[in-house]
Amino acid sequence: MDAKGSDDGLPRDEVIVDRLKAGDEAMFARLLDTWSRGLLRAARGYVSTHESAEDVVQETWLAVLRGVDRFEGRASLRTWVYRIMVNIAKTRGVKDSRTVPFADLAPDDGGPTVDPARFRGPGDPYPGHWKQAPAGWPSTDTEIERREVRSRIDHAVSDLPPRQRIVITLRDIEGYSSEEVCAILEISAANQRVLLHRARAAVRGRLEEYFSAQL
């Protein structure tokens, strides 16, 4: 994806910004339709209720309209909009006693993402290998089964620590690149990788428990 463009069917940033500055309501409505759902998902990681997240997104779009004349193109327009949302959500989250600013949260404890007891020990001929390979997950053939799996994933993500939840939401649910996530959250690439790895491992673990219970 072009750093100044988009992979969601929108025009290039320069075109969008020019249209917004000109008061193009159709262009603004198109942005709302394309990005609001992702903004809402990300905002939900900072605030205590869905309604608060909706308020954050609404405030974000108002701030975008007020500030678009100052957009300088140093980052992509989408990154700029998300940064606005994050700043608003942080403030709202603190007021809601939901969370503290992202950068102030304690780092993850660095513990193992999979129970070490599931691997062969140092005295084994194959140390570090699985004692027993994880069972394969059954296929989800019906819409009801697929909905249930999606619901399990949503619950698993919502139960993650805030830092992990926000990163996996942006990367795996909204499909943003690692570079965009680092820019939006202002974290290092290494930190982003660790948070994403731990989040994915936790969600996989929850799904493994669910599928094991179905066997």
Image (cartoon, helix red, strand yellow):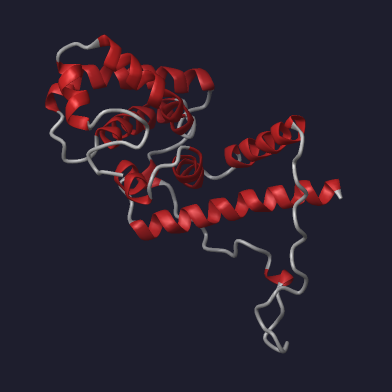
Which residue ends up furthest to the right in the rendered image?
A: 215
Q: Percent x, y for residue 104?
A: 37, 46
Quick one: 144 or 59, which is closer to the camera? 144
Where 199 falls versus 22 (above or below)? below
Q: Percent x, y for residue 85?
A: 34, 29
Q: Is residue 56 visible?
A: no
Q: Quadrant of the N terminus?
A: top left
Identity of the residue drawn at 76% across and 30% down: 144
Left or right relative to 207: residue 89: left
Identity of the residue drawn at 60% across and 55% down: 201
Q: Is residue 201 visible?
A: yes
Quick one: 165 or 143, which is closer to the camera? 143
Where 190 falls versus 147 (above or below)? below
Q: In the picture, residue 148 is in which quadrant?
A: top right
Identity of the residue drawn at 33% across and 33% down: 82
Where 66 falls versus 205 (above or below)? above
Left or right relative to 99: residue 200: right
Where 59 falls versus 72 (above or below)? above
Q: Percent x, y for residue 12?
A: 23, 32
The total number of labels drawn is 0
Q: Percent x, y for residue 160?
A: 57, 44
Identity of the residue drawn at 66% across and 36% down: 150
